[in-house]
Image: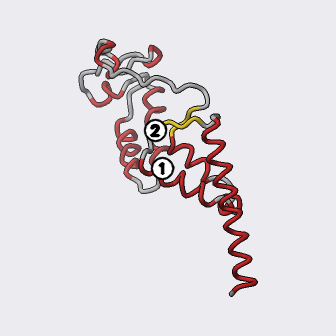
């Protein structure tokens, strides 16, 4: 059975449609037409067949080069010990806390924001006693400030 090139041409002209579904259906019909006649696109177009690598092998052209020597990569940064965290990530975690507790301890919140802007990549020991003391003092100072502000607004002003 001879390949019907007129039908193939009509199907290929339908691929210029603005409707993606119609263009895709035309491409699939053209491929099916070639399969029925046991022809490839190279044979239908009368050109030399292009040798393509087999798809099942996982071949990728960018993988055909040998990998660079391990010394070509920069050394990886060492992992911080457990409990240490970059300040910018600690600040981002604090920003995800509800607004009211952050507002109550605004001195601590303000301190973390400022320090994280100045030293974003510095590590902080989130499990240490120093950060616990700073947190406790910031919360106490913040709550005391709100109590004083409330007293001032109610009784003095």
The image shows residue 68 at horizontal and vertical percentages of 29, 15
Q: Which residue is mark 1?
A: 115
Which of the 4 image quarters holds residue 107?
bottom right
SS at mark 2? Answer: loop
Q: Residues within 10 Å of mark 2 (few under 14, many from 20)?
A: few
The image shows residue 59 at horizontal and vertical percentages of 39, 17
Residue drawn at x 43%, y 37% as measured from the top left: 30
Answer above or below: position of 39 versus 121: above
Towards the viewer: 101 or 61: 101
The image shows residue 117 at horizontal and vertical percentages of 44, 51
The image shows residue 20 at horizontal and vertical percentages of 47, 51
Towards the viewer: 34 or 52: 52
- N-terminal of the two: label 2 or label 1? 1
Residue drawn at x 66%, y 59% as measured from the top left: 141
The reply to whether callout 2 and callout 1 are in contact (CB within 8 Å) is yes
Instruction: Name the quadrant of the C terminus.
Output: bottom right
Please indicate whether residue 51 sits to the left or right of residue 126 in the image: left
Answer above or below: position of 80 versus 51: below
Please indicate whether residue 87 sits to the left or right of residue 128 in the image: left
Q: Which residue is mark 2?
A: 122
Please indicate whether residue 39 sits to the left or right of residue 146 in the image: left
| Direction front: furthest residue | 156
Badge number at residue 63: none
């Amino acid at each position: 059975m001879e390949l019907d090139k007129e039908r193939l041409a009509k199907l290929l002209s339908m691929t210029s449609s603005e409707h993606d579904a119609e263009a895709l259906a035309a491409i699939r019909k053209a491929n099916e037409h070639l399969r029925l006649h046991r022809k490839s696109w190279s044979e239908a177009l009368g050109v030399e067949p292009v040798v393509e690598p087999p798809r099942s092998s996982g071949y990728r052209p960018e993988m055909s080069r040998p990998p660079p020597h391990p010394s070509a990569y920069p050394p990886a940064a060492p992992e911080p010990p457990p409990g240490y965290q970059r300040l910018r990530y600690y600040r981002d975690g604090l920003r995800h806390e509800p607004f009211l507790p952050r507002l109550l301890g605004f001195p601590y919140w303000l301190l973390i924001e400022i320090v994280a802007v100045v030293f974003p990549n510095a590590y902080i020991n989130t499990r240490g006693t120093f950060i616990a003391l700073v947190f406790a003092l910031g919360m106490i100072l913040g709550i005391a400030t709100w109590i004083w502000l409330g007293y001032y607004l109610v009784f003095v002003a």
